[in-house]
Image: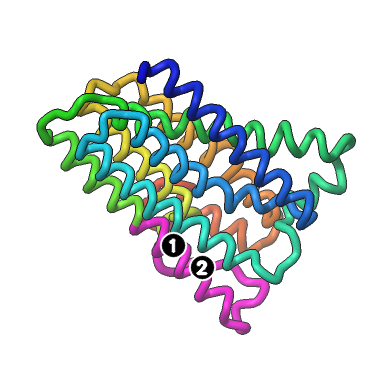
Amino acid sequence: MGHLNSYVILALVLLVHQVCWFAAALIKKRNDVADVAWGLGFVVLAWISFLLGEGNMRGLIVNVLVTVWGLRLSFHIHTRNRGKEEDFRYAQWRREWKNFYLRSFLQVFLLQGFFLFVIAWPVIWVNSADASLWRWWDVAGVILWSIGFLFESIGDHQLTRFKKDSANKGKIITTGLWRYTRHPNYFGEAVQWWGIFLMALSVDGWVTVVSPLLITYLLRYVSGVPMLERKYTGRPEFEEYKRKTSAFFPLPVKK
């Protein structure tokens, strides 16, 4: 099947995926289900593109990595949100937005689908490429992905354990990986996509560099760090933590 036809099919599949999750948001009356849909969307695109493509071993390995990441992230977010009120970011938009449902579909679910498709580009590229020998780019990519996965999953685990301790209620985690970066989970997610991009380089996928650049930019400057930290701005404990600790890339603690 031609590459253009494959991209059209994948775009339609993703559109259906996002519409279904928008319907779930309407039923549950909480837009934060979009965060659960995020990781699952990559898994769907990965395997559909694999079936539409050449079915090469590199693609299989990339798909396994994406599936492990996507399922873990979606399960973590679902478990974190279960039984709680809607995430404060989405709840604020619910209060502030006019034409809430239309804007939710366009600005949350449809826009998320666009970003998801662009970020998944290295995966789609690898799955549509012809089979070729394993290269050092692939090894470097798997290693980098593994580092990112450990950062994200360990960071999430440390934060979950911290919040479960009632003695930490109202406090900010500053231990473990969180001692060296204020957002080890976001950093880890970005690093994983740089790893996937390196594997795409083995099949001349240099143009897909837009993927890791976009996810890094979004997490660091748009929907990740700034949006989450807005909740804590002005609190003395957080301001001191912010002064000493890197926002994204892990660095030694400042004096």
The overriding secondary structure of the stretch rendered in magenta is helix
Residue 170 within the segment the image draws in magenta: yes
Q: Secondary structure at mark 2?
A: helix
**13 relative to 188 in the view: left or right:** right
Q: Are marks 1 and 2 in contact (CB under 8 Å)?
A: yes
Question: Picture coordinates of residue 108 (x, y %)?
Answer: 69, 38
Chain part drawn in magenta:
150-179
Residue 111 visible? The answer is yes
The crowding category of the residue bearing disc 2, from other C-alpha atoms within 10 Å (few below 14, some 14 to 19, many at least 20), is some
Q: Residue at x 61, y 60 (%)?
A: 238
Mark identifier at residue 155: 1
Q: In the image, is residue 32 above or below residue 1?
A: below
Question: Picture coordinates of residue 100 (x, y %)?
Answer: 84, 39
Q: Residue at x 33, y 27 (%)?
A: 125
**16 relative to 215 in the view: left or right:** right
User: Which is nearer the eye, 46 or 112?
Assistant: 46
Residue sitting at the far front:
1
Label 2, on which residue?
159
Residue 42 within the segment the image draws in magenta: no
Q: Secondary structure at mark 1?
A: helix
Spatial CA distance of label 1 from label 2 is: 6 Å
